[in-house]
Image (tube, rainbow, N blue to C red):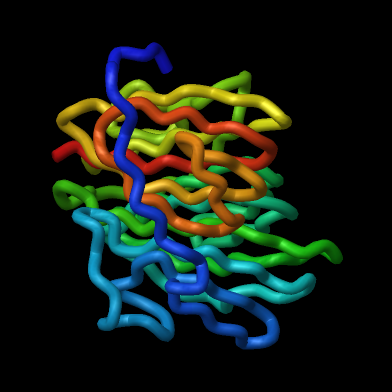
Amino acid sequence: MKNNQNHLAEIKIVDKSDLRSFNFGWIKLTDHFVSTVGPSAGQGKPNGSLLVLADAEIEPGASFPLHSHSQMEILTWVVKGTLHHKDDKGGDQFVNSTGLQLMSARDGISHAEGNSSEQPLRLLQIWIRPSRSINGKALVQQTDIKQKGFQLLAGKEGAPLLIEANVKLWASLLDNENFNFDIDKNSSAYAVSIGGLNWNGIDIEDGAGIFLSDGLIEVKGTGQAIIIIKTK
């Protein structure tokens, strides 16, 4: 992104050890915030319209059984491996590493998802409350990184995946590189740092969460940077 800030963003790190984690054998879960589902349901607090952000590792051959959603925008970023999605609308698709899937549940969809491969699967799943009721048939789409630097992958407008919420998801892949990112003064953000990355001069462990104020961010190292922007 073009730099239009003259101050660094403030960073508040959420260490991985401070997040709720669960190991069920076939799946390991780390909950950044969960207010609706899973073992932490009712314990976490939503982050505005962000209801769930879970970091999951799914063993080969394991999957979530068929279950239903409605009136929810669900983004799934594949950190490594391949996600297999099947649904009652005839959908049967694979999302490869560093790909992003949007499932706009709308009037309702039943689906199963998991790891049908022989390799480990790690993903970030983000549930977003729509800003209005969305009617019609559920929509499942995907996109991926196309170029260097931070890219807008999901948002209300101007993104390959369109969601009905004032939320944007930006992602970047870094290979011993550094990229800058601006957070507008009317926005705040939550990020997940994957791999060995340095954010504004601070080394942050893999899987840690970061609350970000408005301002400039410089990310360095090798890994994946996922930034979720919320408009105030």
- Taking the image as shown, residue 193 lies to the left or right of residue 95, namely left
Whether residue 58 appears in this view of the structure is yes
Residue 118: x percent and y percent?
85, 65
| 139 shown above or below 90 | above
- Residue at 69% x, 86% y is 25
| 135 shown above or below 232 | below
Residue 20: x percent and y percent?
45, 78
Residue 218: x percent and y percent?
48, 28
| Residue nearest the observer in this picture, 60 or 45 | 45
Name which quarter of the figure residue 90 lies in.
bottom right
Exactly how many numbered labels are in the figure? 0
Name which quarter of the figure residue 168 lies in.
top left
Residue 212: x percent and y percent?
32, 43
Name which quarter of the figure residue 157 lies in.
top left
Quadrant showing the N terminus: top left
- Residue at 28% x, 18% y is 5
| 219 shown above or below 230 | above
Residue at the extreme front of the image, as rendered = 201
Whether residue 167 appears in this view of the structure is no
Quadrant showing the C terminus: top left
- Taking the image as shown, residue 124 lies to the left or right of residue 42, namely right
- Residue at 60% x, 29% y is 145
| Residue nearest the observer in this picture, 167 or 208 | 208
- Taking the image as shown, residue 55 lies to the left or right of residue 35, namely right
